Amino acid sequence: MPTDRLNALVSDEARAELLACCASGRWADAVVAGRPYADLEALRAASARALADLDWADVEEALAAHPRIGDRVRGGDRESGWSRREQSGVDDDLRDALAEGNRAYEERFGHVFLICASGLSGAAMLDALRARLGNDERAERAVVRGELAKIVDLRLAKLVGEI
């Protein structure tokens, strides 16, 4: 069972592994405290509950660990590798437009534009970025929470397959 290895880690090690999935310390602490998990679905359910309990400052903590869409992610750690693969749909010819969109988004909302990039083309991400610039803060926060949840679900599946 893939979750057996996560369940067997000491708390500090499990927390460190989980932080690669979501950089909110409060989320990681809640997920660690809920162990053991029978399977990936139980882990994902606990994650969803923990994400729902996060206040906006906790979400911002998680956002701070995400690179901008279109940036060339450096680093050899697990999270950097995941980000590179997740953003593989970004073509070089879109990087300038994404950089411009990222600047506008960050000026408007005060945090990085977050989208679950897996399987999306760079053009689709740019279209979503531009569309979301029209959201008010409340609507955008709801979208960000949904995108974060999708990313975390994908990364949890990767994590239990790797540790």
Image: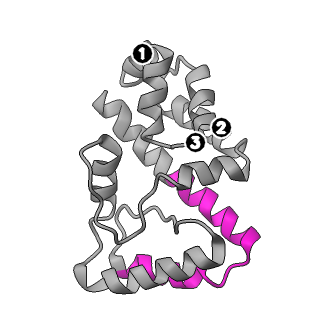
Which circle's residue, 3 or 2, is located before the other in the chain?
3
Write the start and end of the magenta stretch as one range: 123-150
Q: Amino acid at mark 1?
A: Leu
Give the left or right position of residue 13, taking residue 144 as reference.
left
What residue is disc 1 on? 9
| Colouring chosen for the image of the structure | one colour
What residue is disc 2 on? 50
> 44 and 116: which one is in front?
116
Where does the image place residue 5, in percent across and percent down from the top left? 37, 18
Regarding mark 3 in the picture, which secondary structure is present there? Answer: loop
Residue at image x 52%, y 21%?
A: 37
Question: Does residue 34 appear in this view?
Answer: no
Q: How many marks?
A: 3
> Splitting the image into 4 quarters, where does residue 1 fall?
top left
Give the left or right position of residue 3, taking residue 26 as reference.
left
The correct choice, above or below, for 139 with respect to 35 in the image is below
Which circle's residue, 1 or 3, is located before the other in the chain?
1
Give yes or no for residue 141 being in the magenta stretch.
yes
10 Å crowding of disc 2: few (<14), some (14-19), many (20+): some
10 Å crowding of disc 1: few (<14), some (14-19), many (20+): some
* Badge number at residue 24: 3
> 98 and 35: which one is in front?
98
Q: Amino acid at mark 2?
A: Ala
